[in-house]
Image (cartoon, rainbow, N blue to C red):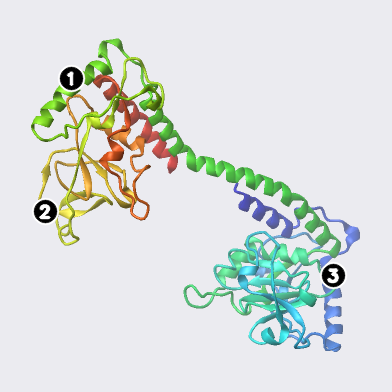
Amino acid sequence: MTPQELKSSILQLAIQGRLVEQRPEEGTGEELYQEIQAEKRRLIKAGKIKREKPLPEITEDDIPFDIPENWKWVRVGSITSLNPKNILDNNINVAFIPMPCVADGFRNQHTFEVRKWQKIKKGFTHFSNGDIGIAKITPCFQNRKSVIFKELENGCGAGSTELSIVRAIENTLIREYLLWFFKTDYFIVNGVKSFAGTAGQQRIHKDFLKTCLIPLPPLAEQKRIVARIEELLPYIDRYEQAWSKLEEFNKRFPDDMQKSLLQYAIQGKLVEQRPEEGTGEELYVKLCLERNGLVTQKKFRGKKHPKLPEEELPFDIPDTWKWVRLGDIISIESGKGLTAAQMAGGSIPVYGGNGITGYHNESLIQEETVVIGRVGFYCGSVHLTEQKSWVTDNAFITTYPQDSIDRKFLVYMLRHMNLGRDNNATAQPVVSGKKIYPLAFPLPPLAEQKRIVAKLEEILPLCEKLKK
């Protein structure tokens, strides 16, 4: 259960009378309701609130769920005063609360700006200390933007017209009980059902709030319900912190596991070493002969790279492996730049600085190989071409001794080496041969390369499943 689901569940138990026990000595919801009606009549007679139109009677078909026998189903408008008006001196400082100042979720928090009453008394919603503000527009309503206003400048304020205001009849209701009711799934779901308006500008129906059914417990039980909720919330907050850490861990875990597997592979810890498969030194001798042939064919840059000193070696590798520089085993050549028109309308993949960017019908390269993204977001990304006919756009074509290096092993290692990490530009990242060629590369025997690839292809799909 998520923290939000747990909070919702507790609030639902609260309004169903199942969070605290009922006590006969505390009276009934009916008795409290009659007290509220008497107080409302007194306030109407004194001119402090307006007389309202009668609300629809509540039938058995209207009742959404069972409540204790000593509670009473009532309508919100019958026990509160809605959207009251302030009459204040024009020059008094008051609180101004636009919608962003109201916290969402299960919090009861707000901030405010200080304005002169004269500047905000028209065109805004009025409220005072102790009033409850409820957002009535999507998505603020669903996000539970509702709050009890408190410590307002001079006790009064005005704010967003997208707020509905509920004022409890003095000393007859616990405001916090009302607020928690307004944050229940029951209230939110039914409010959304009443939505009217155009897409993106939908609001609860103008009559929804006053006609909404609310369970009314005795006043003392309201206090105990609120106390119980406030007792439980700190525990739920701690649960939420632990939940968030676990969720973050679960999100990172597949990627971290993949990185760990590749790190094990590149360190020679993923599969065992077998003496009969030879050594990286022996393979390197064969690789050099093959590379020299490619140099003669002008398919490989023949520049020599200095031997790796001990202080440049990033980690230990098996005795049967050999450290080489990347420039000893691969050569890169830039593909030509293509226009958008050149990349349109064909069936041939274009591997480029921005990944697989389009299609092309000309200048085909008829050989599978490895492509390294050269610029932009895909700087240093590594692609294995998926078919023999393809073309590059602003990317590196990789040549390497194919009898000595397993293609998939090379791809896995290059991806793990994060070639774009130390690019030589910021606004438009670019990876270059000057950065790539000096990098240290661990070279295992060819047969072990193939076994490493087989093991990775067995395990890595399991990591992908964890992401779903």
Callout 2 crowding tier (Cα within 10 Å): few <14, some 14–19, many ≥20: some
Viewer-proximal residue, 353 or 149? Answer: 353
Marks 3 & 2, CB-CB < 8 Å contact: no
Q: Is residue 175 above or below residue 468?
A: below
- Which residue does the image show at 69% across and 53% down from the upper left? 10
**Crowding at label 3, few (<14), some or many (≥20) Cα neighbours within 10 Å?**
many
Q: Are marks 1 and 2 in contact (CB under 8 Å)?
A: no
Residue under pointer 2: 361
Q: Which mark is residue 286?
A: 1
Q: Secondary structure at mark 2?
A: loop
- Residue type at mark 2? Asn
In the drawing, does residue 288 fall left or right of residue 261? left
Decide: is 258 above or below 194: above
Front of the two marks 3 and 2: 2
Residue 265 found in image quarter? top left
Q: Amino acid at mark 3?
A: Leu
Looking at the rendered structure, the kind of residue marked 1 is Lys
Question: Which quadrant is the C terminus positioned in?
Answer: top left
